[in-house]
Image: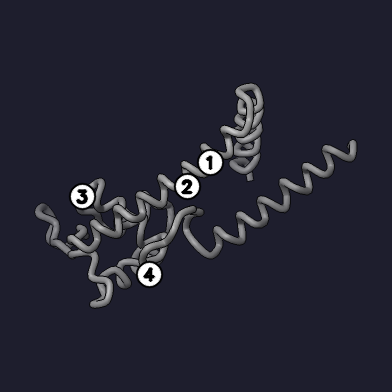
Amino acid sequence: MNQQVENKAIQIDTLLNQLHTVAEQQREILFGTVQSDITTTQGHILMLLNQKGPQTNKELAEALQVSRAAITKAMKGLQTSECNCVIPVLDAKDARLIRFTVNHQGAIFAKLHGEQHAATLAVYEKIMQEFSSSEQQVIGRFITALDECLQEE
């Protein structure tokens, strides 16, 4: 293996390990200023509830691909007197099910979380603009190939 390829492989390895470390500490990687004390998981829950309407813990867990326990923990934080962002509502068809919906405060936090997503995409777009169209195609092929390798694991 030539030195340049080896150096890039080490660079990729370092980046993926850094991403993994960050991902262990939060549900997603977002850029932009955090304007609330809620976690990224809680922010994403609020964003989903705001976009899709009332959801059960099970539905939220499936949508976010996390455990129900993680959703339950996040929802408890969203129902505290300090946060007070969600409202539990009995399901109209099955009273055994509890669905959650956002209140006014929850909608504000959902909007802030959406803005963080937009800021993150803007960072990626700014970086990509530094590359020519052909370089962007190579980057796209690389991302696809790396994603396929990660999916196999």
Q: Is residue 67 visible?
A: no
- Give x and y (percent) for residue 153: 63, 46
**Mark 4 residue type:** Asp
Label 4 belongs to which residue?
37
In the image, residue 86 above or below residue 139: below
Label 2 belongs to which residue?
120
- Give x and y (percent) for residue 59: 30, 52
Label 1 belongs to which residue?
124
**Mark 2 residue type:** Thr
> Secondary structure beneath disc 3?
loop
> Secondary structure beneath disc 4?
loop
Spatial CA distance of label 4 from label 1 is 25 Å
Q: Residue furthest left?
A: 92
Which circle's residue, 3 or 2, is located before the other in the chain?
3
Say which of 101 and 96 sits in front: 101
Spatial CA distance of label 3 from label 1 is 29 Å
Say which of 147 and 114 sits in front: 114
Label 3 belongs to which residue?
53
The quadrant in which residue 139 appears is top right
Spatial CA distance of label 3 from label 2 is 24 Å
Dot 3: few (<14), some (14–19), or many (≥20) neighbours within 10 Å? few
Which circle's residue, 3 or 4, is located before the other in the chain?
4
Dots 2, 4 in contact, CB < 8 A: no
